[in-house]
Amino acid sequence: MIHNRIEIGKEVVTKKYRSKIAADKEAQILNACKGTNLTADLYSQQGTVLQMSFLKGVSLLELLNQSDYNSSCVASMEQAIQALCRWLDAFETHTQAVLGKTVVLNDLHLNNFLLCGDRVAGVDFEVWHFGEPEENTAILLAYLESYWLKTEGLKEDLCRTVRLCRRSEQWQLVENTRIQKQLAIAKRRLIRPMLQQSTAVILAGGQASRMEGVPKQSLRWHGYTFLEHLIFCLDCFDECVCSVQQDFEQECILPCWNDEISGQGPLAALATVLNHAATPLVFVTACDTPLLTRELIAKIYQEMQQESDYCIVKTSDGKIHPLCGIYRKSMESVIRTNLQQGNRKIMRCLEQAKGTIIQLDDRLSQCLLNVNTPEIYQTMQSIIPLSHLF
């Protein structure tokens, strides 16, 4: 799976997304803000391809990274942050009026905002949720505090500017959310090298017998298939593939790796994906866990030990989930030895390697609801997708 691709013309920008959900979420914001100068204007959408107006400007992050931090530059940066706060005020007011709720932007990275003359315009609206204005304040403060600045005291000055411009009586909510976002940003920075050394694999080679033969990856939830939800969640990986039976390959929108031997269970599927992977690490998840979030992925990568052969999770009900976690490519030999000896049980195989099992709390445990029966599928329809933290 390739990254989002952006083709910039003189008047039109074409953006090709990895995920249909990401394309639809950005289109919803662009449509809501059409004609306001808050964002680019959306011209058209065809599936995962959006065409929008070209915005000429300089990113706020580029301003922040200027080599010469003289008094004039510092003043211009403070003015730019003030303009960004005015943009946020206008954006929240407008989205509240059009969509009925305030939009919270999970990614308030300064690279996503352009200074176009004397105004700020936003770009990149793939990850957002409905919430409260205080959340936007907290996320912006967390991003500002995560940047490295050469001038001592500048970071504090810019954060003070945000607090003054975005004054709110709900400071406790701001502080609590801010801490959560700072932790998420720190996790992302720490695990980024490991994500770049990983291939994400969605295991979709099961028989779906308990789902009355309906392929679970094709089931729909909130307008999208389980597979589309997982692709959106796994957008943090450079490469994402699907491990499938041969009869599903033509229907899949991802690159596919076929099971070597059909019907041999998840341990054989693991051997196949580890054999195919060109990266030292492989993150696997089952196609029947559409509630998976990037927050849970970040936690697993944060807990992965250098000496561990694998890192999987245990939910609050005591159940271990070997099909949600990280495996080193070197595990293939252990797995194949077990398969040759007639053992197809994953946990018995993992007992012969050195690994980490993470205990999840009740909240994160909900992300691993296995939707493998019609009854569970009916029950989960009322669950709202969780927002992603990075």
Image: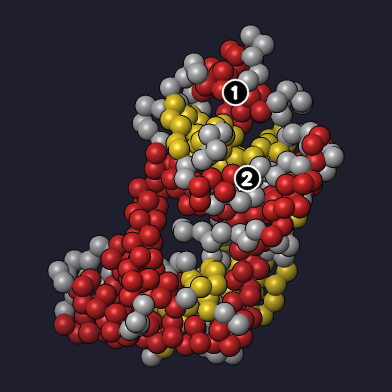
Task: Identify the residue at the far front of this view.
Answer: 317
Which residue is found at the position 47% from the left and 42% from the top? 360
CA neighbours of label 1 inside 10 A, class few (<14), some (14 to 19), many (20+):
some
Residue 268 visible, this angle:
yes
The residue under label 2 is which amino acid type?
Leu
The residue under label 1 is which amino acid type?
Ile
Which residue is found at the position 28% from the left and 66% from the top? 145
Figure quadrant of residue 63: bottom left
Q: How many marks?
A: 2
Figure quadrant of residue 274: top right
Task: Identify the residue at the far top of this view.
Answer: 341
Q: Are marks 2 and 1 in contact (CB under 8 Å)?
A: no
Q: Which x, y percent locates residue 162?
A: 31, 79
Which residue is found at the position 45% from the left and 48% from the top? 298
Q: On the image, numbered disc 1 is attached to which residue? A: 346
Residue 206 in the figure: left or right of residue 104: right
- Along the viewing direction, whichever of 121 and 389 lies nearer the viewer: 389
- Along the viewing direction, whichever of 93 and 384 lies nearer the viewer: 384
Secondary structure, mark 1, is helix
Q: Which x, y percent locates residue 210?
A: 79, 36
Secondary structure, mark 2, is loop
Q: Which x, y percent locates residue 309?
A: 45, 26
Q: On the image, numbered disc 2 is attached to which residue? A: 369
Q: Nearer the viewer, mark 2 or mark 1?
A: 2
Find the distance from the CA under tag 2 to the CA under tag 1.
Answer: 19 Å
Q: Which x, y percent locates residue 131?
A: 51, 73
Which residue is found at the position 63% from the left and 24% from the top? 267
Residue 168 in the figure: left or right of residue 266: left
Q: Which mark is residue 106?
A: none
Mark 2 or 1, nearer chain start: 1
